[in-house]
Image (cartoon, rainbow, N blue to C red):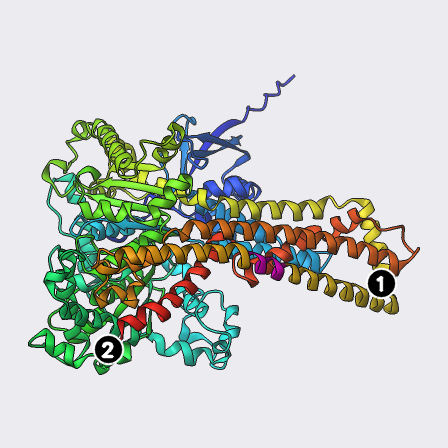
Amino acid sequence: MAHNPRKARPSKVLIRLCDAFTRTDGNIICPLIKAEISIRVLYKLQEKVLYKAVQEAGTGIGLTDPTFLWKSAATGREMDGNLFVEYSNSQRFNDNLKQYRETLVRNLKEVLKVKSILIDKVEDTDEIIPQPIISETCFELHKLKLCSERLDPDDFDTGATRSVAYDTIKSHLDDLKGQYTKFAVLSQNGRGKSFILNLLMLLTADFEEEYGENNLNLKLPKDIDENVKLEEIEKYADLPDVVKDFLKTLSKEQTKECARTVIGPLCCELPKVKEVQHSNNSLSNVANYFSTNSRINIDPYILAQKATEKSYESTTKCIIHLRYGTVYQMSVNYFTEKDLQQQLFELVTLNDEDSSSLMGETNKKIRKRAQECLKARFEILTDYGSFTNSQEMKDKFQSPKDIVLSKEVQKLAGKTELYIGNGKEAHYDRLAMRRILRKLTTYDSNDEYSKKKIAAVKQIMIYLPSKILYGGKEILEMPGTDDSDPMAMYFIQTALNEADAVIVISEFAFNIAEKEVKHMLSSSDFAKYWKEKPYNYKLMLLAYPEKNQGWQYGKDDSEAITQLEGEERNKRTEELRLISDIFKMKDMMDSEKEELEENIITAFILPVLHTSILAQPTEQGEEYKVFQENEKFLKHTGISNLITEMDTFVSSRQKSTTEKIRNKFSHICQEMSDNSKGVREAARTVLCVLNNREIKDTLESTINSNHKKLLINFTRGIVELLKEIVNTKVDAALKETVKQAQTNWRRNENKIIHRGVFSPFFIGKNPVYKVLLYNIFFDGLEDKKTRIFTEIKTRIEALLQQYKGNILQQLTNDLNMVLGNNPPSFTLQFVQDAIGNELDDALSWYVGNKRRPFNVKTMRKCFEKSQNQCFKETILIPNFEKD
């Protein structure tokens, strides 16, 4: 009898699936990847989709029964780890993964953006290879976006109620995308702010193919339908960010105008560029710094890299805002004619004043610098030329209105310019934007018109495709603190007051940073807010010593660079001691000190070394080996830690919003899957009864009438509440402030003898003078405002809850009265279950979107806007412009 051979036992085949690194301009490895194109994120959030793809890919080469294995890396970050797929294989496997790779990439590309995948057959799961960092904010945003895409309001069987919830979620997501955490970069001139930011933008730039794909649906202003009104333009979701920002500034009346007629003239043509290859060659040279210890000279990536001493460059006072955008784009806002006249009249007031009488009341260095810069701006912005003496200027200009700007400047004044790339070729768009930005920030003696633009610029906002900015990060590049022109100092102080995090850059340590840096930081509102609520703010003290030869490391310096660990510990100890002195922390409780210290980052950063290492050549698909082979160096450059610290901080600030959206998703899903039988029956009964038109009309009329009464009472309650607080708390606070202002005035009156103190541009904070009118008039008001606004918010929220309860009870009564004995008696719980959450959504939407975000910060901004306007019109302008 023949022997039946036993079937061969299937063998196992193990395949590792990883996110591949990509290379940016200059062939530099990008250390970040967006969540939406990551295979790790796909596994975490859409495992079934990935399973189907790997199953089909395996079947094509005889691999069956795929099982996922996740091996975490010991970093503490959720997405750090490698994904493995274990297959069964009943036939001999020849290790040829070409067909498998092609099939898997094709399957994923058809439904998702995932395509940069590193696929290897391995023997075990022991080796965890490096992969690009996935931002926490990017991961969370992608997760919420996926959930929202699965909620189609047309599928909701209960119609309007869940549609309201869907709209609320969409509104929250839009709010989240519009929330920016501001990182202000503070230092003296010549410390490398622009250079460091250029390297960070280069390191994390979207690669060329990614840039084109992200902008496939880009809607440029010229593509807008000819007759579309501005109010209808919201349907274009793929408009450039600068256009969306501009639309937010328009009044309701302006939105009735034709979109192309309004936006078209603002859009400026991008210059043609030819230096693409030169720029790429320049960026590629950075690789030699690490491999051959060569000096490097690379072109600026996007920001102009200014010299330390240039007389006119010091008059470039604007803050440059950097945000993420899929396409290179920039908006430029110019000062109004009135602003420029007031600024230039400052020169008249300074020249009019006896320098000897100013010695005690002014900052001598600032005053001298102000005169130099204002004189330069006066000659550029007007056609008067130079004046022989101050008396001649005084005789000619009695008030700001007497100053006539040149015709070119008059055309620029109050204008907004929009520059937008075509979204097809990243190299050309970036270089065109770089050229424009340079003309707006860097003095060119051969370009007179460029000088006028530089002198008139108020603010520059740049959106660029660099992943370090993705997820709501905004970096503010500020003038150097040693540029003591008062306008620059005022802009720096304003930016610090609005910042959520401050990055202080010094050469070696904060301890030996310039006194102007320490003073600007310690006297800012940021310092005050950080001390009050440390976890809402972050102070980052970064030393950039890389310009010094002793801090330049090459491939043979692996042992020398490890000494930085001890240096960083010593640096942190000394800097915490200094911060304690500057911010008067000695009298604080230990727990308070610990909270503050936990929100101070101290580090050395070596961005050139980091960039140079990531510029090292490899075979395609082996970029991860650069991280493996140079792990010791990359650990000590401080750049990876800086990126993750920034991201973690932003994620923590967005936590309340993301949790709110997650809770809303959970509620909707629970409703859709677990609607109790009793509620469904009761709802069905209501719908059946309402098929009777007469009953339906009666019920709607009754509900509308009763709700109108409740709304009137609710509105009256808010008005009465606000009247009460205004007539008591606000009135008392303002009277106390006036009394204190009178005392302050008497104490300082003899020092306030110069018109420049009243300059409206500085709103009573002109840094030329030691006495600041703002502090005299509003001493102690800030704390009073915070207490009052907190009380308003608390009491209005209580009224909202009362209003909600009244609505629910009234609806319960209306249902029972109109429907009579047809259904069983409706309870308050039924009405609560049916519309309670939707009512919360409606109230939240009304208070948040209709009436602006309802919080203390918004109330403070509204109050201060009115306060400053009143201060200007009643005190500053009359005294500044008087003859």
In the rendered structure, does residue 755 fall within the stretch colored magenta? no
Residue 721 colored magenta? Answer: yes
- Give the mark, 2 or 1, whose residue is nearer the N terminus: 1
Which residue is the site of mark 1?
A: 690
Task: Find the residue positioned furthest to the top.
Answer: 1
Percent across and percent down for residue 804 are 69, 53
Relative vertical location of residue 839 with respect to residue 292 in this rendering, above or below: below
Marking on residue 883: 2
Residue type at tag 2 = Asp
- Above or below — where is 419 with respect to 501? below
The residue under the point 41% across, 33% down is 121
Q: Nearer the viewer, residue 445 or 425?
A: 445
- Residue 696: name its quadrant: bottom right
- As drawn, the residue found furthest toward the left would be 388
Is residue 804 shown above or below 380?
above
Distance Cα–Cα, label 2 vs label 1:
75 Å
Q: Position of residue 29 (x, y in %)?
A: 29, 45
Query: What is the span of residues highlighted in magenta in the rendered image?
Result: 718-725
Query: At which x and y percent is residue 556?
Result: 15, 31
Badge 2 vs badge 1, beta-carbon distance below 8 Å: no
Q: Is residue 653 left or right of residue 551?
A: right
> From the image, which quarter does the C terminus lie in?
bottom left
Q: Is residue 94 visible?
A: no
Residue at the (50%, 72%) spot, across then down? 233
x, y percentage for residue 447? 15, 73
Q: Residues within 10 Å of mark 1 (few under 14, many from 20)?
A: some
Say which residue appears at 10% left-offset and 61% top-offset: 356
Report which quarter residue 714 is drawn in: bottom right
The quadrant the N terminus occupies is: top right
Element at badge 1?
Answer: loop
- For label 2, count other residues whose C-alpha is less than 10 Å away and answer few (under 14), some (14-19) or many (20+): few
Amino acid at the residue labelled 1: Leu
